[in-house]
Amino acid sequence: MISINTYIKSLFASITLLAAVSCSNTWEDHSSTNDDNLKLTLSERIKNTPETSEFGKLLVETGFDDELSNSKTYTVWAPTNAAIAQVNPDLLSDLASKRLFVQNHIALTAFSSVTEQDTVTVQMLSNKYLEFKNGTVMADANVVTADQYAANGLFHIISKALEPKANIWQYLKEKTGSNAMSSYLSTLNEFNIYQSDSIAKAFEFHEIYADSLTNSYLKNVYNLNNEKNKYTFFLLEDDAYNSEVGKLEPYLTKSNQDSTTTYASYFAVRDFAFHKAVAREKLSETVFVSRFGVEVDIDETKIVEEVQLSNGIVYIMSSLDVPLEKRLLTTIIEGEAPSSFSQGDKRANTFYREREDLDGVMFFDIMVQNHGVPLFAINYSANNLYSTTYNVYWRAINDIQTNTFQQSLRIGGGILPDGTIADPIAELGPMDVAPNIYDEIFIGEFTLNEAGRLDLISLIAANTAVNGNNTLSLDYLKLVPVIK
């Protein structure tokens, strides 16, 4: 039989824990209770508990004994004395290191072992994010004794210290000088891949996360300095890295060799970061598709080392071959997303349509009809084009008129003061647009000698003012790069 006093104490403890989990404000005054634990602060409890006295000494050395004595609510995962004895001395070599170590064991608000969630992600005072699993495991440390409460929070005694890990970006920076791929990534603090990258670089940043704002890789691919998210990153050894860059250089030709190598390097490494942390045992069943649409196949036999970091995993690879067929992506330009129009305002004659094809599939397109202007043009642009030949296709739907009209496509060129176009790269067409044809049509090819952006791709109406014969229609353009 359970005595009434035991029942009341258990109920009180449950209520206390529930309040801790559900509220991050200062705990209510428990001075009316007779429980001595509620008269002590977390700092006092940890220092007075024989099993955690060594961690208590670290609290004093770092000044966190005062912080854990104030009125805020905290949770502390306190390592046993035996766990502290196993800590790498380098992590406790100076005051700054000791403070980071201690911060990695403390969180604001209270986290009980009793929770409806299997895993709770906890932001530590170190700004690292650790996972508290089923109330029994914190990161990779087992909870020995849970839910020890004090006047201003909870502490759990754990079997292993929570040594603060570097994040992926910090790890890559440490490899600068010893790894060619890491060294290249660090240069993107200075080099702009895109014109927009220069904005943040115009200001000076000195804080720890400044690279997140100024590095072109972190800005355009993934911010590997971000502690909130988890990533998988494949870091290539030098021979493998140089091989991937060399494959891409003929397709990323720029004005000089240095720029060519820089761009080829960027296009090589941008596909090796993924916005999820994938454990080694899950690699074989995971389809890795970069945020740029490139599928990367992982050969696990080529993994040299696996490095667990605070915001994900780095796999060091002796080889990671991505075929050009997967690297060289097709560019799709949607008809309903023009950059500009030529020869006056024809908004009244421009229709952004939602249509249905013969198979019942919905699509969006643009049609400019009855505008009365010979050679009227809809202009588009395209980024990240390769220095190679492109096969060009369009889908242009003529589902309103009963007659065939013609339109053409002009690639590149500069606009002169009189509005004419000088030195276009290619002019394709004119091509017939017959009624009710929903097929994708090959219209020709063009070759780019230098990789980069095309600011002017123009869909041009027939050279007539006769309405019905100068209609323009476009679902999409497809630019398919040719492997040399």
Image: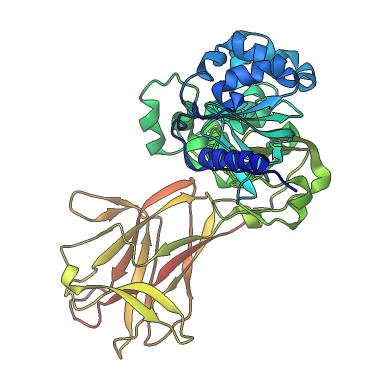
Task: Name the side, left or right, on which 201 lies relative to 234.
Answer: left
Q: Is residue 357 above or below residue 185?
A: below
> Of residues 254 and 340, which is closer to you in this image?
340
Residue at the image point whose x is 71% and y is 41% from the top = 136
In the depicted structure, whether residue 266 falls above or below residue 69: below
Q: Is residue 474 visible?
A: no
Rendered image quadrant of residue 250: top right
User: x and y percent of residue 401 in the render?
Assistant: 29, 87
Q: Nearer the viewer, residue 238 or 284?
A: 284
Where on the picture, by quarter, is residue 9? top right
Give the camera-side residue of 79 and 127.
79
Q: Of 394 and 101, which appears nearest the observer? A: 101
- Residue 66: x and y in percent read 52, 14
* In the image, farthest residue toward the bottom: 402
| Res. 473 in view | yes
**Image point (30%, 91%), residue name:** 402
- Name the image quarter holding the C terminus: bottom right
Would you say 115 lies left or right of 367 here? right
Where does the image place residue 238, in percent across and percent down from the top left?
72, 32
Identify the residue shown where x is 67% and y is 28%: 180
In the figure, is residue 260 to the left or right of 282? left
